[in-house]
Image: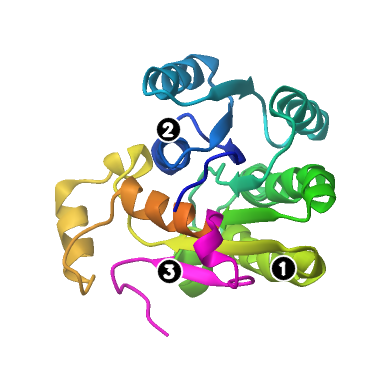
Amino acid sequence: MSLSGRVAFVTGASQGIGRACAARLAKEGASVALAARSQEKLNELAGEITAGGGQAATFALDVTDEEQVRSAIKAAIAQFGKIDILVNNAGITRDQLIMRMKRADWEAVLQTNLTSAYLCTQQVTSSMLKQRWGRIINVASVFGQMGQAGQANYAASKAGLIGLTMAVARELGSRNITCNAVAPGFIETAMTEVLGDEFKQSAARQIPLGRVGTVDDVASAVAFLASDEASYITGHVLNVNGGMLMG
């Protein structure tokens, strides 16, 4: 799945799934623009990529800020000449039962998880249209497909990402630009570390493969969708959930 000569822009690249995706794309040969709020963590990852012989640049930004997104993507294109691959991964949670959920928590999750994907997609489209090649990959969630109590905002944002994926796939398909989503299940990340071992063991028992997923499981799916091997796949939701949800 060589990505040599390709340029990827990854949001939420400072940790978790985003970090793993950026590292994997770099391993496959892509130059990677790393975007997140934490400059320190981005610098650390960029150092690892360059030490391994890859190319990386960092762009500290708030993905909910349209001007920051526009500036970062413009700077990335100026540095690398183009953007071939966009991974919309940035995401947060603000869990609460719907009857107690504050409007601010609803807005924050929708802005970070969904609106940011719209902003980034809009900004990279011109570059992809010019070269008549592009890969847009949205990191959704199994809970955007099946819902989850206490996560109305998160589930709505991820379901919205799936709808956005299909709409963009239809809009851009004629220009050889694909748009797909990856829907992880229960993945071991910093976000899930706070959950107790008992909860994790209970979750694993509900997964046919008998284990929670790793960030590398998701990164492998993203790398595939970014490659030429996935050139005839668009508008698709690739489940990476160990069988947690089927059909």
Q: Amino acid at mark 3?
A: Asn
Q: Amino acid at mark 1?
A: Ala
Task: Count the marks.
Answer: 3
Left or right? Give the position of 105 relative to 123. left
Residue at numbered disc 3? 239
Give residue 79's position: percent from left, percent from top.
Answer: 71, 22
Residue 233 within the magenta-colored segment of the rendering? yes
Image depth: mark 1 or mark 2 in front: 1
Give residue 117's position: percent from left, percent from top.
Answer: 69, 49
Q: Which of the two discs, 3 and 1, labels the residue nearer the N terminus?
A: 1
Q: Is residue 62 visible?
A: yes
Question: Which contiguous range is marked in magenta?
Answer: 226-247
Report the Cα–Cα distance between label 3 and label 2.
Answer: 21 Å
The residue lying at 64 percent from left, 72 percent from top is 235
Report the Cα–Cα distance between label 3 and label 1.
Answer: 18 Å
Q: Amino acid at mark 2?
A: Gln
Question: Which picture quadrant has residue 120?
Answer: top right
Residue 75 within the magenta-colored segment of the rendering? no
Give residue 21's position: percent from left, percent from top.
Answer: 45, 43
Q: Quadrant of the C terminus?
A: bottom left
The answer to whether residue 104 is above or below residue 169 is: above
